[in-house]
Image (cartoon, coloured by chain):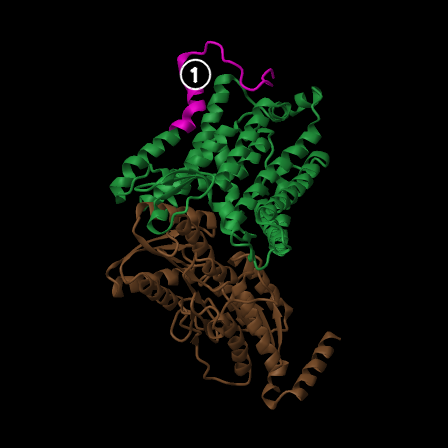
Amino acid sequence: MRNASTMTAALLGTLLLSSASVSAADIKIGFLPGVVDPFYQVMQLGVEAAAKDLGVEVVTQVPPTWGVEAQTPILDAMVARGDLNYIITAPTDKDQMVAPLQAALDAGIKIITVDTFLGDGDYAKGPVTFPISYIGSDNVEGGRISARGLAKAIGGKGTVYINSTNPNVSSVEGREQGFAEVMKNEYPDIKVLGPDYNLDDQNKAAQQTAAVIEQNPDLAGVFGTNVFSAGGAGNAVVNAGLGGHVQVVAYDATAEAIELMNKGVVSLVLAQKPFDMGYMAVQFAVADHAGVTSLPRRVETGFAIIDKDNVSDPNFSRFIYKVGN
Amino acid sequence: MTDSKAMPAEPRLPPDKRFILLASRLWAWAFLGLMIAFFIIVVPLSGGATFLTLRNAMNILVAITPVLLLGLGQTFVIISAGIDLSVGWVMSLASVVSAHAIRASFNAGAPLFLAATLGFLAAVAASAGVGLVNGLIIAKLKVPAFIVTLGSSFIVRGMALLFSENTTVIGLPADIRDYGNESLFYVVNGEGGGFYAFFRPDVTGAMLRQMDRIFTWPVVITAIVVIICMFILNRTQFGRHTYAIGGNMQAALRTGIPVDRHIVKLYMLSSVTAGIAGFLSTLRFTAGSAVIGDPLLLSSIAAVIIGGVSLFGGAGSIMGTVIGALIIAVLTTGLVMMNVQAFWQFIVVGAVVIIAVLIDQSRDLVLGRRGRGS
């Protein structure tokens, strides 16, 4: 019955849509992001928009917590459904998720990774080559952009501090790496402290930053590798009477990060483009199914840098992660 | 079992045993003192900063408030030979609920102070509700506290995430920040400075950086809760009953203590101090967070144990928990200032927890108290 009604819907869709979607109508895509958060929720909007535009069905399952042990059982269950042709996923670990996703591939499901990747992210020549593509931000580049933005804001000299969440997570690790690299190579007059890891504890991020300010009264800037880091660091900066003097750069344009910017706690916000990632991943699946063989193995979606001056400009504010309403 | 009165005066023990008893009472103070002395000497060597400044001391007090508040109610529960694993998530739930209450009432036209008060009441009510359910299941249905609070922690966590908007509740009035970050007293250092009470002096620019906030409001509120807890534990029948239940449940029942009702109250108390922590974090970060308390549970239990509360029940003090929380916070700040990987903190805290339990046990050996609890 269920199959029959799906078929009817698919046929109707086919009749209504252009011929390009004829072959797409009979595929079903699973979407498995990393965790519940605004970034992935915006990505889901992208996935759903593309599914609607291209007339394919998408099944979404969101792990409640970040981690391999949360993501793998859901992945296995999606594979066990038996009706999915593609899975679009953000692997929660670049090594540990290889085997579970390989198993999905062996079950006949093709894999596209978004936001995070497997192996080193080079699916053409790297250690892991079975996913169709990686579509996401270049986090190392994001770290570089953050570094240049912060360097500009503090006039190219002084001491800056990195507050991060957890070690060995490819995304924040890449951000730290790119940030430190630019400061070392392009801004010899800037000294980098940290990273300290707050383990996703905003209170601890505030305490760590307060301690760093005590030790370095001349601190000029802080790079918070996510919104908790930036929020905690910003709290310490403002309480030390240094709001506006110590520049805080936040990664990820959550509504909270923008609110912190409007309150003067954060001076610069780096927005990724999760909508693009989700939309393109569905497009790639449809294209692959239609027989396209020249899909790029790696697509970098770029960034938007939001500050107080451009936050109300629609060309920039459209990249703030908005969910619902 | 004649020791239902907590810690009677020990008669004429040999010197080595007296030393162990003395050490068991004072070692946490001594450890804290030694650690501070260590940082006072080493921090300047490793970076040139001074560890013992007024501002740094205040930063540490601010940092201990959440761990300490979670630990305060937990102290009562553990003295009664129970455990409350739900406190971290109760804190998150209270943070979310209070943020909603503050935002809704402020947007409906309530003045800021009233909105904050409603936020406080909402946090207390939500957390007390969780504690009531925990306590009823533990006391009436006789399910072990470990299991009940483990289960409820998951439920509470889910509720906190459901009630939040993508894990955070934002859009609070900006001035609510002052309640979470401004203070009772201010010292403005340098020329034209001075000492100010209650109202923030009108300083800007470079002068602002010379201003120290002495006892921010969360610290003040936490201190009040500490004093209330001390009073309850040391001076009231409620406190005596708590020790009695933890020391010997059967004896407590025989002496007519309303044990069931008492246990319900204990878990409500534990939840409410966690709820206050959630409320204060909402003020401090001007947003409700459904994950703010996640990492704090184990630190708070560690603080309680370092403070000398016996996991077997019947012994412990509020001051001990305060010292335990201070040890953890001083370590974090000191290690960051020394530029040492903050992960060393875990290793030191872990070692200190084990030492604390060893000292607790050796005290029991000296006093000849074995096999306590029920």
Residue furthest to the top:
B12
Residue A51 position, x and y percent, is 60, 77
Span shown in magenta: B1-30
Q: Which chain is brown?
A: A
Residue that carries the numbered disc 1 in the rendered image: B17
Quarter of the figure with residue B327: top left
Residue B234 position, x and y percent, is 57, 23
Which residue is at the front of the view, A33 or A43?
A: A43
Colour used to depict chain B in the structure image:
green
Residue A11 position, x and y percent, is 69, 85
Query: Is residue A227 rendered magenta in the image?
Result: no
Label 1 Cα neighbours within 10 Å, binned few <14 / some 14-19 / many ≥20: some
* Point 57% across, 35% down: residue: B73
Which residue is at the front of the view, B126 or A265?
A: A265
* Point 56% across, 66% down: residue: A41
Q: Quadrant of the N terminus of chain A?
A: bottom right
Quarter of the figure with residue B26: top left
Q: How many marks?
A: 1
Residue furthest to the bottom:
A19
Quarter of the figure with residue A77: bottom right
- Compared across the picture, whether B309 is left or right of B148 comes to left
